[in-house]
Image: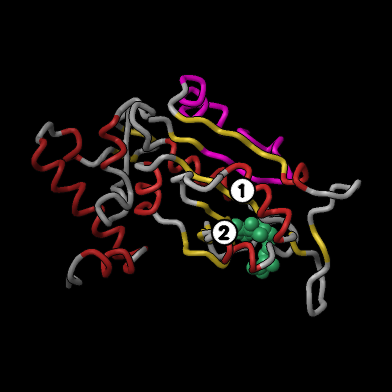
Amino acid sequence: MTFRASVLTLYPEMFPGALGLSLAGRALERGDWSLEAVQIREFASDRHRTVDDTPAGGGAGMVMRADILAKAIDHVSPPGDQRPRLLMSPRGRPLAQERVRELAAGAGALIVCGRFEGVDQRVIEARGLEEVSIGDYILSGGEPAALVLLDAVVRLLPGVMGNEASGSEESFEGGLLEHPHYTRPQEWERRAIPEVLVSGNHGKIAEWRRAEAEKLTRERRPDLLAATQPVRK
Ligand code: SAH
């Protein structure tokens, strides 16, 4: 089963963008996943291909119209399409690895990229759009957010990552941030690689990595520890 991504956007030229290169790009070429970027303007009905209008109630900016967006959604994701329908939105649930893993296990995703002030609330409700945020800051459009989401998902698809093991040992996978990394040279600017890592003692190495991961997580992201295990002293 190929993961199918359909992106609704006013800037289809932004895709595949960075996802056309490296791991994701090679996987795209191999057909491990597919991507269609659909121009929302194609579903506009007037000569100027207008997709937005002024906000009801007044105020600055423009709002994407429900009727036009719904036409685009219905065209790309007709009834019966099993894929979740996502709307990139700063008001959404913050994207985390757990949701990324769920998405990667599914048939694909329809991703709506907002622009201007956002989209008419009625289309969010009527088409059951799941709002997804990539962090507490405002982008100028949903496209970079969609690229971020797809990057995170695609690298988890079967066969995409060269070394499968490196996926399961990363930050967040065990509810912890990852331990620090080192590589040659053994000494650099009078800094040595921690002794234990060159000891060849794999039990000790695993223990050290676990302890470092816990220490980092406690210092930087105590919220992650609280979510996965009882708080330690
Ligand atoms: N007026 C809105 C922001 C609109 S930004 C508000 O204050 O909530 C324009 C578009 O960029 C949004 O519709 C959304 O699709 C995208 N976007 C901006 N920030 C985002 C974020 N942190 N995560 C996901 N999408 C984002």
Q: Quadrant of ligand 1?
A: bottom right
Which residue in the protein does label 2 denote? 127
Q: Is residue 147 left or right of residue 176?
A: right
Quadrant holding the C terminus? bottom left
- Look at 28% across and 55% down and name the residue there: 176
List x then y, in percent, for residue 175.
27, 56
Which residue in the protein does label 1 denote? 74
Q: In this view, does 148 lie to the left or right of 185?
A: right
Name the amino acid type tagged 2.
Answer: Arg
- Report the magenta residues as a range: 5-30
Q: What separation in Å lies between label 1 and label 2 (alpha carbons)?
A: 9 Å
**The residue positioned farthest toward the bottom in the image shown:** 57
Q: Does the magenta stretch include residue 18?
A: yes
**The residue positioned farthest toward the front in the image shown:** 79
Q: Does the magenta stretch include residue 27?
A: yes
List x then y, in percent, for residue 123.
63, 62
Could you say which disc has been placed on residue 56 in the image? none
Name the amino acid type tagged 1.
Answer: Asp
